[in-house]
Amino acid sequence: MYRSQRLALKYLAAAMVLFGLMVVFGILASIYYVHPTFLLNTFNFNTAKILHINTLIIWHLMGFFGAVYWFLPGETGREVEGIALAEIMFWIFCAAVAIVAAVFILVQYGASDEFSLWFINQGRKYVEAPRWAAIGILAVATVFGYNVVASAVKSTRRSGILMVLILDLVPLVVLYLDAFPAMTDMSKDLFWWWWLVHLWVEATWEILIGCIMAWALMELLGTSRRVVESWLYVEVALVLGTGILGLGHHYFWIGTPGYWLGIGGFFSALEPLPLLGMVIHAIYDSGTRHLRAGNRPALYWTLAEAFGNFIGAGVWGFMMTLPQINLYSHGTQWTASHGHFAFWGAYSCGVIAVLYLAVGGSRERKALDGRAWKWSFAMLNLGMLGMVGGLLVAGMDQAFFERALGGSTWGAFIALQHRPWYVEGVWTRMGFGVLFAAGYAMLMYDLLTIGKRRRGEAEEPLKEAAA
Amino acid sequence: MYTRDPAFWRAGAIASTLFMSAVLLILTVNSLDAITPGGSHVPLYDVINHQISYAYDSARGEYVPKIGGRELLFNHQYSEAEAKALIAKGKMVIQSRACMDCHTFFGNGAYYAPDLTRAWIDPVWDEYPGTKRGDAMAAFLMHPFRLGYHEMPNLHLNRAEADAAVAYLKWMSAVDTNGFPNGFGVAQAK
C-alpha cells in the first residue's frame, strides 16, 4: 500500500469521527425545537447549530481528501508527491479542528471586535471558524492541491479525470478566501457569501465528488475509462452550465435586482438534469452487472448516492426553487428538509461508498458482506428519510401559515410554534434522528470489525463475486 | 461516432463553463452597483434618520419599503459617516454573537428564531412609536424577555452594542428585497 493510501485511511477515519460528532450535535440541536428553553444561557441553540454544520462541512472535506489520496497513486502509478508534507498537514488539520471545537463549546462568543473574529467565532453561517483556523484550512487545501498537481506533473499518465480535478481545485481554494471578510452591508456580505456556499456545494464539490465517483465506478464495476470520462465531461457541462447561474436562486431576496428572479428560477430549475443523468448512468451500469460487485456495500452506497443526489438535491431543490414558491418557502424548515436530504444524497453516501472501497482494499481478508452493513444502510437511509419528511411537514406548515398567511412577523413565528403540524414535524425529525444515530453506530461497528468477525458470515459473497 | 469520443464532451464542458462564468461576471458587476449603499436597492446608512414603513406597490405587484419623513433614532441626527460607523459596529455585534445561527437575515441563516429582515417595523413594537422604538429594542436586546414559547438568550450586549444592533436592523428594514417577506405585518394590522 502507498503512503498516500495510509494517509487516506487516516483522513477517512477522522471523517467518520466528525460524522459522529455531527450526529450528536444534530440530535442536541433538535431538542431545542421541542423544548425551546433547553440549556438556555448555558449552551444556546446557535452553539449546537454551529457545531452541527461545521462538523458537517469538515467531515465531508476530510472524506474528499481521503478519497483523493486513496485513488491518486492508482491513477498516476506512483507515490503522491509531497506526501510527507501532507501527513504533517493532516495532524495540523485535526489539531485545528479540535481547538476550534473546544473554543466554540467553552467560549462560544466574544465582544463585538476584530479579536472575536480572529480567535473565537466569525458568526457567518458555515464559515463560523475563526480566521486563524480559516487560514489553516486554506493551508491544508493548498498542500492538497500541490499534492495532486505535482503528482500529475511527475506522472507520465495524463487522465481526463485528473485534469478535471486539478481545474476544479483552483475555484475550490480561491472561493474559500470568501471566508474572511466582514462587510457591513448585509446585501454585499450575502452576495459574496453565496459565491462560497453555492459555488462550493452546488458546483465545485459536485465536480470533486464526480471525479471521486468516476474512480470508484472504475474500481467497483470495472466501467471503462472512456465511458466514465465522457460522463464526467457531460456532468461538468451540465453542473456548471446550470449551476453557475443557478446561483441566482440565492439572489431573489437579498437586495439584488429583480432580474435574478427569472435567471435564478430558470437555471436552478435545470439543475436536476445532471443529477438525473447520474441516476440513469448508475442504473445502467449496475443493471448490466445484475447488482453484483465484489464490494456490495460500496455498490449499494453508490446507488444511494445517485438516487439521493437526484431526489434530495434535484427534486427537493426544484420543489422550492421557483421564486413564486420560494417567496414563502425561503428560510423555513422546508429549506432544512432540502439541505439535509441534498447533503446526504450528494456527498455523504459517496464518501461512505469510498470508505467501503478503501476498507476493501486495505484489510487482509476482503470479507465485506454480512448483516451489519445492511442494517446500517437501512437505518441511516430510513432515519434520513424520516427527518426529511418531518422537516418537510413542519416547513410547509411554516411556509403557508407563518409566511403566507401570517406575514412572517415575530407574532406569526410564535403562533407557528403551537401549530400541530409544525410540532409533529419537529418531533418526527428528532425521533428519526435517533434512528439515524443508531444507523451510524452500526456503520462504525461494521467498519471496525470487518474481517474480524466469524469466517462463515463473511466468505460466502466472495465466492459469488469470484464466480 | 463523434459522441463516443470524450473530447467532444470535453469541448462542451469547457464551452458551457466559460460562457456561464462570463455571464455571471457581467451580472455581478451590475448587481454590486445596485447593492452598494445609495444604489437602486440598498439605502445609504443615514436612512436611520427617517421613518421606514412597508407597503404594497401596485405597479410592481409586491411589497416595498417606504422611506418617510424625519424620525430620529436615539434622538440623534446621524451624518452618513456617523451612521456608517454605527452600523459597521452593529454588523460586528451580529457576527460576534452569531445571530445568524438562530435567526435569518433576508431569509438566510438558521431557522430557529424569527426572520429579522423587517424587525424594525414588526407590529410587536407598535406600542413604542417614533423615537421610543430604538430604546425599547435596545432594552430588549440587553435583557430579552420571554414572548410566547421562545425565549432569546442573554448575550451580554452593553448599551453601545445594543444601540448599534438596533441601528443595523433599522437600516436593513429599508433594503428593497423584491417583495420579501410578502405582506409583512399586514395580517396583524387587520
Image (cartoon, coloured by chain):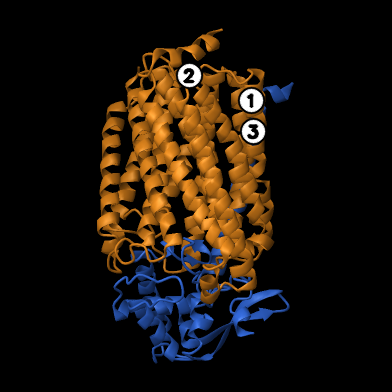
Same-chain status of marks 2 and 1:
no
Q: How far apart are marks 2 and 3 (CA)?
A: 30 Å
Q: Colour of chain A?
A: orange
Q: Mark 3 lies on which chain?
A: A
Classed neighbour count for the residue bearing mark 3: other residues with Cα under 10 Å, few (<14), some (14–19), many (≥20): many
Q: Which numbered tag is attached to residue A157?
A: 2
Rendered image quadrant of residue B26: bottom right
Q: Which of marks 2 and 3 is nearer the N terminus?
A: 2
Marks 2 and 1 sit apart, C-alpha to C-alpha, by 17 Å
Whether residues under marks 3 and 1 lie with C-beta atoms below 8 angstroms apart, the answer is no
Classify 10 Å Cα crowding around label 2: few (below 14), some (14-19), many (20 and above).
few
**Which residue is labeled 1 in the image?**
B6
SS type, badge 2: loop
Mark 2 and mark 3 on one chain: yes
Residue A137 on image: x %, y %? 34, 44
What residue does disc 3 label?
A: A279
Residue A188: percent from left, percent from top: 49, 64
